Image: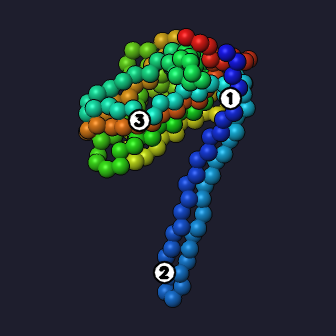
Amino acid sequence: MTTTLRSKVEVQLGWTWRDRIGPFVVTDDNRLLSVKELSDGAAAGQADVVWHAAGQTLAAGQSTTLELAALVQSVFNDTILISLARVKAILVVNKNATGSAFLLVGAAGADEFSAPFGMLGDTVKVMPASPLLLANLGEGWSVEPGHEVLLFQAIGGEVVFDIAILGTASQGGGGSSSSA
């Protein structure tokens, strides 16, 4: 199977902040925006594979792991095996609209993928109705044998989440997904 991937990572934080100072209203209406389009390939600033899953549900206290070197995806009327060599971006969205249940990401222990977190054992919380974007759009984070497992844990209740992982199938030149 030959594939071509065009991808874009776009994140924006916008605000309108008003304050009354005496008889005057002062407004700070602004935004911070980052947009990066990645062409197809395995070099810096490129990506050639994406894995995604919507509506993933974990019961309170339940966990699941993703083996980044062996992600199964149903797409194009086929099941493909995506073996990531580099991770360019991970987007996780906690779909819970209310409550305090959150998703804890990281600290898988054995074979832990910790590159975006800084150290082995580090985690990050994805709070209700909130996204988490981890990105290294240049070179990406290397997925190495013995460091390829990402852990997700539901804390404080059931968590429903969506996830997408953008990356490359090889460390350097070319590569794409293959049929499983």
Image location of residue 68, percent across then percent down: 51, 19
* Residue appearing at x 41%, y 35% in the figure: 55
Relative to 16, does residue 131 appear above or below in the rendering? above
Amino acid type, label 2: Arg
| Of pointers 3 and 1, the one earlier in the residue sequence | 1
Neighbour tally class for label 2: few under 14, some 14-19, many 20 plus, Cα within 10 Å = few
Outermost residue toward the front? 77
Amino acid type, label 3: Gly
| Of pointers 3 and 2, the one earlier in the residue sequence | 2
Neighbour tally class for label 3: few under 14, some 14-19, many 20 plus, Cα within 10 Å = few
Amino acid type, label 1: Leu
Relative to 161, does residue 110 appear above or below in the rendering? above
Marks 1 and 2 in Cβ contact (< 8 Å)? no
| Of pointers 1 and 2, the one earlier in the residue sequence | 1
Relative to 56, does residue 110 appear above or below in the rendering? above
Image depth: mark 1 or mark 2 in front? 1
The numbered dot on residue 55 is: 3
Q: Mark 2 = which residue?
A: 20
The numbered dot on residue 5 is: 1
Measure how far apart labels 3 and 2 are at the Cα level.
44 Å
Is residue 123 shown left or right of residue 61? right
* Residue appearing at x 61%, y 33% in the figure: 136
